[in-house]
């Protein structure tokens, strides 16, 4: 038995599980649930509702992944993580996939031993200032006091930007978005900087959103994407192609409403047929069911639906698709072909 | 069957290791050592295996790589091109600063509140009780967050200081209280500053020696010493005269060139510039730590004063000592013996609690080394080890100081 | 006689004057005020200052509390209500009425709320014999002893035999001790400890597994049928609920639109329309009812989805059992074969990285093959064990400790920390007093290291580093890791409290015990510890209060304690931007709890002082 001395004691209490064996898929299957790391609370991306159910853009990716693996979008355990604990949770095997709006960077991919499986949101760091300040460009911010959230790439970008433009600033590092927002609104800082999506989401909940403007400069590239442990290529493939399937589904017009109908019988579009498993044996190549993509889409809709429901223009967050539109619409969201 | 007449066997038997009290303690200690060593070995072996499995190395090299992030309050020189190690030092300096300030203020608050709680004044005693219970029974983290937010909300923004704004600077336009912190004038030292510093030091030493001499004289002759007030006033007056005189004598453009001038804060583009900024995060953390720890110290002080029996006070009065001398010469020295040990452990708590600085964005060592650095480099094992050792070192220093004090004031018993 | 009297004294009054009222300054309220508030200049200044402080606080806070809004669905609606009522400031406690269950229980399934409640209710009889020892029969101590197991079982659920198996370990230890004490006490102790450890580490897990296996095997068929039936049954129910939720959506949207129109009407300049105000407030109430319905429906839907998901998991996993069990011997044989073929230097390694430098490529390949065979074997075993572990449960439905949150989490961590640390704390205190050099040194080092480092660093150690220190591949519950660390932390503090108690005992007690010829453990158990622990109880209660307050730090490692939850609540678009109300509520709850505990410890202190006179 692969049970160490300590584990023996703990399994009596049913509190321990062995994990991090080479094949994540087997572990996930044995457990019957996907463990998905999300943020402890980020408007639009992951937050619990009054019933205690997690909701949001990142959360829906996890549900889709659970759909692909189990055919059941409810088979997910959400593990709330802070910026400090997220990478360790992944490398120790506490979670199977990290969907916690994490920026894909070189050192995280190599040194921290993560594998980013793609980008589900193209973001960039922006600035928000009160309109009354009369600032129209981030380069006018010489001497400004800037509120930032710590533990992210944000503070590095900020340091680089001000250094490159040879202007000075005073950083006010804040642990949570809520505190940063309170400080900014009380005028303790002139500028609030974080990912542009976060700024828009935050501004939308102000008492007077029109009194604040987002500056035109986006000072960094923040490709946010889910990550898995380094070294398990099979599992990385499953996560990667689940994301790709959601993106392709939007491109091909497959939605949660029509997916069951389209998957019932082969359609005239071979691309749709391959995606939905009515043609070929694509699922089996990853060790999944032929209907993996159908189940992933049925769990929460295609990429566009997930976007619109959680952070789209009709939500309080109110983000436009922008860079995150399909490539056919001038955006960057582009899936490798499913064939 | 054994009889009492049987002779005890000579020599050493193995069973003596268990039965004989002389050897048993040795056995137990050897077993404990073996257990401890094997546990430590087990932990280290596991760590090595885990690090190997993750492909990481145990390496402090990250300390010399470029940090890349900025810190707002830097007591030692720092910018983002310096190393992570340097950033950790900046954090250590910040931790020590807030811990030092906090210990002083907490003691002041604690002593005042502790005494006032014993006051016969009903309103004051109740108010103090409410303060003590309120702070003792709510988590410190909440107080830190609340005090920070309260300070931000209740003080004016820098832009309110502009023409026609609602706020203005105080103390002849030299101090500005804003919700980003308190801006005070900073001293600027000129060429004569060193000389003046030396003169000041000499003056203080002279005054101290003089005072001491006159106290000794009192012991010998009973002649009342020169009052402390007079010594202090003459010291200050003398130094002021030197300062003014030096201002006229020193070469310079103007006729009066003081050795030290003040640089007052002025409202710049976004914020006050010049002067010294006491950031809100520092003040909020300082206040929160002092108020929280002060509540505990107040209880210690109260218990200390109550522990001195009433007979001592009465005896002092019977000797004809005035109330304040009774306090200074009779009650306090006895109460202090009870107060100091728990007081020091409160200082220790305060220092450790300063690690909550991150809640208000104060860049202490937990936020730099234990926060951003670990997060950017992924060296949690090494970082946490350093962080833990730092706090351990501080607390060992403080507690050895406490032991030293305890031994020195211990009632000498037979 | 009367004459002389008349000559020497001019006038003698022979009736008593009626008793006069004391001067106004010397009686009643005035006297009290004079003596207590204005007895001196300093006192007068202090009094006036205090009254001013109180007045400032009240005048600032009163309107905020007085105008508070308790019914609203979001912060925006709160602001609307305040605007309609014409209040410039006001608290939005609607967030509390919306989320208070979450702040109390976290994500614990609402159907099982009775379990934590019962656990905390049972805490009272469990603590009674310890805290009110003179009024409660000593036999109740048995219940106190059993309580931790009962509480664990109630909170986490699982099969009823699990706590019994753990208790059986103590019984095994006790039996061995009794048997061994005929030979020698030390042998008995060692045998008892080893026996209990063997039981917990090897016997109990396999008994547990085989019980689950047995029950699971007998049930597998019926569970399959039940699951199929359940899914068939639930599917239409789910559809019906979803349809009802769909129906509700336009109703809510319409009500929202009406409300928006009303807001405009009321807040329009100069409008003093009382009727519209009343209509608006009624609309808000109506909306609230609708939203509650919607929320309840959503909860039902999620519950059904969860049930269906569980059924689906069973349906897909149970049929794989026969195949898995069939494969097992083959997998085992393959692994044994490959392992045996390895060179001895490579045997027992857990990753290829551990292979010594200069290992040939061939050997490395063999190692990789063996390792992958092992991982196959492990996952098959794990799969079988976990399926039986699911279907063989007889008892309460298991609840994941990730679902713990809010005050319940703070209480569970605090209580577990204190109760688990008692034993270790007492041992450390005795160790620190011991005159065995090594034992003394180890105890002092442990206590000082734990106390010298802030709890937050220990918590980060629990969340980031504990996995490094345990065998590779071990992964267990974050909450358990936190409890372990908190236990170490509080045991160092308890040790110091108990040491104080030990030091407070008069030396005569130790000497008397020695004079009676008791050995160390007997003198400790029968004479010293009962007295020392009794003196220490107030200190232990204070340690608990401190620990309970410190549980708020777990938010930094992602556990959702009340403060952590308040951040999550503010991340929802409804409540983004709310600030003070949540903190006030959380602070108040902590205050009530800690204050009453503190009062209790004061009462104990007083009572104990009387005992000693």
Image (spheres, grey):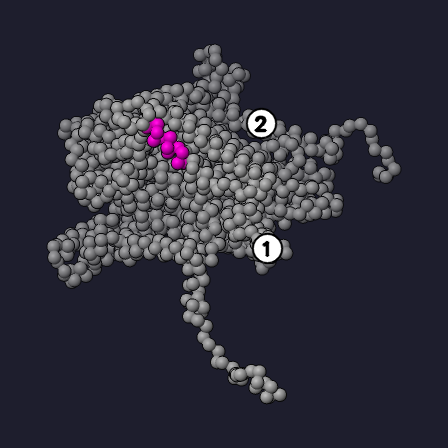
Where residue B334 sits: x, y (%)? 57, 46
Query: Can residue C219 be spotted in the picture?
Result: no
Secondary structure found at label 1:
helix
Residue bearing mark 1: B318
**Chain at tag 1:** B
Question: In the picture shown, does residue B173 fall above or below C345?
Answer: below
Q: Predominant secondary structure in magenta?
A: helix
Is residue B241 magenta-colored? yes
Residue bearing mark 2: B38
Where residue C105 sits: x, y (%)? 39, 48
**Chain at tag 2:** B
Neighbour tally class for label 2: few under 14, some 14-19, many 20 plus, Cα within 10 Å: few
Which residue is depicted at the point 34% across and 23% down?
B191
Query: Can residue B333 be spotted in the picture?
Result: yes
> Disc 2 vs disc 1: which is toward the camera?
1
Range shown magenta? B236-247
Q: Which mark is residue C130?
A: none
Where residue C404 sits: x, y (%)? 40, 44
Which residue is depicted at the point 38% across and 42% down?
B287
Question: In the picture shown, does residue A292 fall above or below C612?
Answer: above
Extreme residue toward the right, this view: B5
Q: Closer to the camera, C167 or C222? A: C167
Q: CA distance from mark 2 to mark 1?
A: 66 Å
In the rendered structure, the answer to whether residue A258 lies left or right of residue B240 reads: left
In the rendered structure, the answer to whether residue A254 lies left or right of residue A35 reads: left
Where residue B70 sits: x, y (%)? 31, 27
Earlier sequence position, callout 2 versus callout 1: 2
Secondary structure found at label 2:
helix
Neighbour tally class for label 1: few under 14, some 14-19, many 20 plus, Cα within 10 Å: few
Is residue B133 magenta-colored? no
Q: Pointer 2 and pointer 1: residues touching (CB < 8 Å)?
A: no
């Amino acid at each position: 038995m692969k049970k160490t001395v300590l584990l023996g004691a703990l399994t009596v209490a049913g509190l321990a599980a062995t994990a991090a064996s080479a094949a994540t898929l087997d572990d996930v299957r044995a457990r019957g649930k996907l463990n998905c790391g999300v943020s402890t609370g980020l408007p639009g991306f992951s937050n619990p509702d009054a019933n205690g159910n997690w909701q949001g853009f990142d959360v829906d990716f996890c549900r889709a992944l659970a759909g692909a693996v189990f055919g059941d979008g409810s088979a997910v355990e959400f593990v709330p993580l802070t910026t400090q604990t997220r990478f360790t949770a992944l490398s120790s095997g506490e979670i199977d996939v990290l969907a916690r709006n994490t920026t894909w960077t070189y050192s995280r991919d190599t040194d921290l031993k993560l594998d980013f499986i793609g980008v589900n949101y193209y973001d960039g760091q922006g600035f928000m200032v009160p309109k009354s300040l009369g600032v129209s460009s981030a380069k006018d911010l010489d001497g400004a006091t800037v509120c930032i959230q710590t533990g992210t790439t944000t503070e590095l970008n900020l340091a680089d930007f001000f250094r490159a433009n040879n202007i000075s600033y005073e950083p006010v590092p804040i642990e949570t978005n809520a505190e940063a927002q309170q400080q900014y609104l009380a005028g303790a800082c002139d500028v609030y900087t974080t990912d542009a999506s976060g700024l828009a989401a935050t501004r939308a909940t102000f008492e007077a959103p029109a009194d604040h403007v987002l500056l035109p400069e986006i000072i960094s590239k923040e490709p946010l994407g889910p990550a898995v442990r380094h070294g398990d290529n099979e599992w990385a493939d499953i996560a990667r192609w689940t994301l790709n399937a959601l993106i392709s589904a939007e491109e091909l017009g497959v939605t949660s409403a029509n997916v069951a109908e389209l998957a019932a019988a082969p359609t005239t579009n071979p691309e749709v047929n391959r995606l939905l498993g009515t043609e070929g044996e694509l699922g089996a190549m990853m060790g999944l069911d032929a209907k993996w993509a159908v189940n992933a889409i049925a769990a929460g809709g295609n990429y566009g639906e997930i976007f619109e429901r959680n952070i789209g223009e009709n939500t309080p967050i109110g983000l436009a698709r922008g860079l995150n539109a399909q490539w056919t619409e001038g955006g960057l969201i582009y899936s490798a072909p499913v064939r | 069957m054994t009889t009492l007449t049987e002779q005890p066997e000579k020599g050493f038997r193995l069973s003596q290791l268990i039965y004989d009290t002389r050897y048993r303690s040795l056995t137990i200690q050897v077993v404990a050592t073996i257990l401890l060593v094997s546990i430590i070995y087990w932990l280290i072996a596991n760590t090595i295996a885990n690090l190997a499995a993750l492909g990481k190395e145990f390496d402090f090299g990250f300390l010399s790589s470029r940090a890349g992030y900025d810190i707002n309050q830097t007591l030692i020189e720092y910018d983002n091109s310096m190393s992570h190690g340097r950033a950790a030092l900046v954090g250590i300096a910040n931790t020590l600063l807030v811990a030092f300030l906090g210990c002083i203020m907490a003691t002041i608050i604690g002593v005042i509140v502790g005494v006032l709680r014993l006051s016969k004044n009903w309103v004051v005693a109740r108010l103090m009780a409410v303060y003590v219970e309120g702070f003792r029974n709510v988590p410190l983290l909440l107080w830190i967050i609340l005090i920070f937010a309260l300070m931000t909300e209740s003080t004016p923004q820098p832009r309110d200081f502009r023409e026609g704004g609602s706020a203005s600077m105080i103390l002849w336009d030299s101090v500005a209280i804003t919700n980003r912190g308190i801006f005070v004038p900073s001293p600027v030292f000129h060429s004569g500053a060193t000389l003046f510093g030396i003169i000041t030091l000499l003056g203080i030493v002279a005054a101290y020696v003089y005072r001491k001499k006159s106290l000794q004289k009192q012991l010998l002759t009973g002649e009342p010493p020169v009052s402390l007030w007079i010594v202090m006033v003459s010291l200050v007056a003398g130094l002021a005269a030197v300062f003014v005189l030096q201002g006229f004598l020193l070469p310079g453009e103007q006729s009066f060139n003081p050795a030290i001038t003040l640089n007052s804060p002025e409202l710049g583009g976004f914020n006050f510039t010049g002067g010294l900024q006491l950031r809100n995060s520092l003040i909020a953390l300082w206040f929160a730590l002092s108020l929280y720890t002060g509540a505990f110290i107040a209880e210690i002080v109260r218990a200390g004063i109550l522990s001195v029996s009433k007979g001592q006070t009465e005896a002092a009065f019977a000797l004809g000592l005035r109330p304040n001398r009774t306090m200074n010469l009779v009650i306090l020295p006895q109460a202090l013996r009870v107060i100091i040990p728990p007081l020091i452990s409160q200082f220790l708590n305060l220092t450790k609690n300063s690690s909550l600085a991150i809640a208000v964005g104060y860049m202490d060592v937990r936020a730099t080394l234990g926060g951003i650095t670990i997060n950017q480099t992924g060296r949690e094992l090494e970082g946490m080890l350093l962080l833990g050792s730092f706090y351990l070192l501080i607390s060992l220093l403080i507690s050895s100081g406490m032991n030293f004090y305890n031994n020195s004031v211990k009632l000498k018993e037979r | 006689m009367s004459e002389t009297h008349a000559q020497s004294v001019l006038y003698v009054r022979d009736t008593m004057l009626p008793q006069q009222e004391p001067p106004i300054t010397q009686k009643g309220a005035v006297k009290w005020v004079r003596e207590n508030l204005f007895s001196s200049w300093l006192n007068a200044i202090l009094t006036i200052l205090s009254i001013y402080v109180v007045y400032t606080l009240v005048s600032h806070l009163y309107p905020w509390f007085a105008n508070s809004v308790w019914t609203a669905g979001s912060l925006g609606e709160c602001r609307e209500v305040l605007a309609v009522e014409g209040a410039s400031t006001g608290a939005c406690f609607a967030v509390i009425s919306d989320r208070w269950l979450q702040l109390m229980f976290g994500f614990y399934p609402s159907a099982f709320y009775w379990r934590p409640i019962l656990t905390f209710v049972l805490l009272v009889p469990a603590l009674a014999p310890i805290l009110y020892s003179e009024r409660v029969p000593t036999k109740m101590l048995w219940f106190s002893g059993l309580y931790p197991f009962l509480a664990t079982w109630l909170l986490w659920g699982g099969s009823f035999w699990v706590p019994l198996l753990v208790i059986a370990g103590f019984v095994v230890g006790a039996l061995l001790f009794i048997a061994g004490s005929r030979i020698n006490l030390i042998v008995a102790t060692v045998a008892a400890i080893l026996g209990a450890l063997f039981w917990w580490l090897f016997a109990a897990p396999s008994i547990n597994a085989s019980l689950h296996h047995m029950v699971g095997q007998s049930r597998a068929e019926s569970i399959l049928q039940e699951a199929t039936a359940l899914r068939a049954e639930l599917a239409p129910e789910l559809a019906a609920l979803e349809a009802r939720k769909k129906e509700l959506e336009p109703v809510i949207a319409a009500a929202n639109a009406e409300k928006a129109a009303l807001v405009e009407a009321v807040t329009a300049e100069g409008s003093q329309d009382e009727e519209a105000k009343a209509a608006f407030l009624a609309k808000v109430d109506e909306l609230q009812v609708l939203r509650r319905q919607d929320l309840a429906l959503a909860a039902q839907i999620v519950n059904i989805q969860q049930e269906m998901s569980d059924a689906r998991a069973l349906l897909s996993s149970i049929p794989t059992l026969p195949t898995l069990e069939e494969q097992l011997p083959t997998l085992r044989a393959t692994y044994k074969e490959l392992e045996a073929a390895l060179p001895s230097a490579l045997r027992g390694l857990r990753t290829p990285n551990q292979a010594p430098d200069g290992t040939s490529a061939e050997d490395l390949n063999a190692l990789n093959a063996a390792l992958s065979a092992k991982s196959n074997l492990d996952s098959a075993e794990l799969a079988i064990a976990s399926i039986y572990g699911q279907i063989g449960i007889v008892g309460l439905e298991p609840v994941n400790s990730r679902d713990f949150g809010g005050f319940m989490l703070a209480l569970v961590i605090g209580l577990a920390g204190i109760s688990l640390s008692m034993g270790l704390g007492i041992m450390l205190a005795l160790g620190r007093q011991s005159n065995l050099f090594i034992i003394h040194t180890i105890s002092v080092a442990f206590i000082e290291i734990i106390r010298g480092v802030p709890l937050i660093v220990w918590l980060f150690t629990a969340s980031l580093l504990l996995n490094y220190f345990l065998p590779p591949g071990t992964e267990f519950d974050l909450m358990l890791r936190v409890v372990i660390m908190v236990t170490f932390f509080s045991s160092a503090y308890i040790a110091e409290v108990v040491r104080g108690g030990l030091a407070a005992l008069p030396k005569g007690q130790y000497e008397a015990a020695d004079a009676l010829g008791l050995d160390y453990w007997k003198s400790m158990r029968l004479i010293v510890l009962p007295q020392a622990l009794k003196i220490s109880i107030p200190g232990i209660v204070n340690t608990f209060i401190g620990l309970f307050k410190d549980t708020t730090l777990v938010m930094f490692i992602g556990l959702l304690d009340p403060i952590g939850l308040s951040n999550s609540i503010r991340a929802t678009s409804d409540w983004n931007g709310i600030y003070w109300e949540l903190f006030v509520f959380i602070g108040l709850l902590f205050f009530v709890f800690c204050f009453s505990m503190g009062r209790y410890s004061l009462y104990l202190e007083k009572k104990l002082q009387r005992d000693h006179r």
